[in-house]
Image: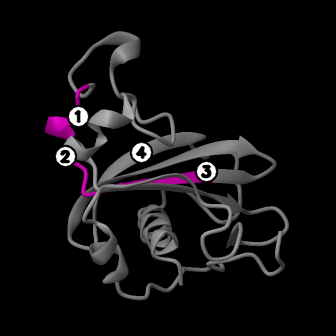
Amino acid sequence: MDKHRKLVILGLNKLLSQNLISLTPTKGEAKSGYIFAELAGHSSVVMWQDIGHDEIRISVWWKYAHNKHPHANLTGASQEKFNTSKPLCRSTHYPKFIGVAVSAWLERKTGKYLQGHGHDRLFAIYTRKGEQSALAALPEVAPQGYAAESQLQM
């Protein structure tokens, strides 16, 4: 399985285990949100956002150090509020506070699966220099009630 996809599965499993999202859309469900969580032994942020048509964007920032994020303690529109798939700062700052970032879409209407196969359909990907081996060492992870990939090539 693609190493970045494993991170998305770890994050999605965490959201499901805490009942923050559901594989079946329900009224009253939070349209977006985030949690700080430990994934594969490292501090992370897992975000979700309803993108319509019963799909959710899942984003994971792995090896995340909030105290080093240049927008963590700002105010107003400049403050990081975890609303987007990428951090709210220039990418030149990423190596200071984030190891890996990746996003994917969770389909919930026509089936329960992460869209795409392998690296396909993953987006907003950032991998800090030196993190490839840590990603490759991630253990296989089983999705909780959904498929890790689409049934058909998209």
The residue beneath circle 4 is: 34
Q: Mark 4, mark 2: which one is toward the viewer?
A: 2
Q: Mark 4, mark 1: which one is toward the viewer?
A: 1
Among the two numbered marks 4 and 2 on one chain, the one whose residue lies closer to the N terminus: 4
- Asked which secondary structure carries label 3, the reply is strand
Q: Is residue 91 above or below residue 137?
A: above
Marks 3 and 2, how far apart at CA: 22 Å
Report if residue 127 is visible in the image. yes
Seen at 44% across and 84% down, the residue is: 141
Residue range (magenta): 57-70
Give the residue type that dot 2 points to. Answer: Ala
- Circles 4 and 2 in contact, beta carbons < 8 Å: no
Among the two numbered marks 1 and 3 on one chain, the one whose residue lies closer to the N terminus: 3
Q: Is residue 63 left or right of residue 31?
A: left
The residue beneath circle 2 is: 65
The residue beneath circle 1 is: 69
Give the residue type that dot 1 points to. Answer: His
The residue beneath circle 3 is: 57
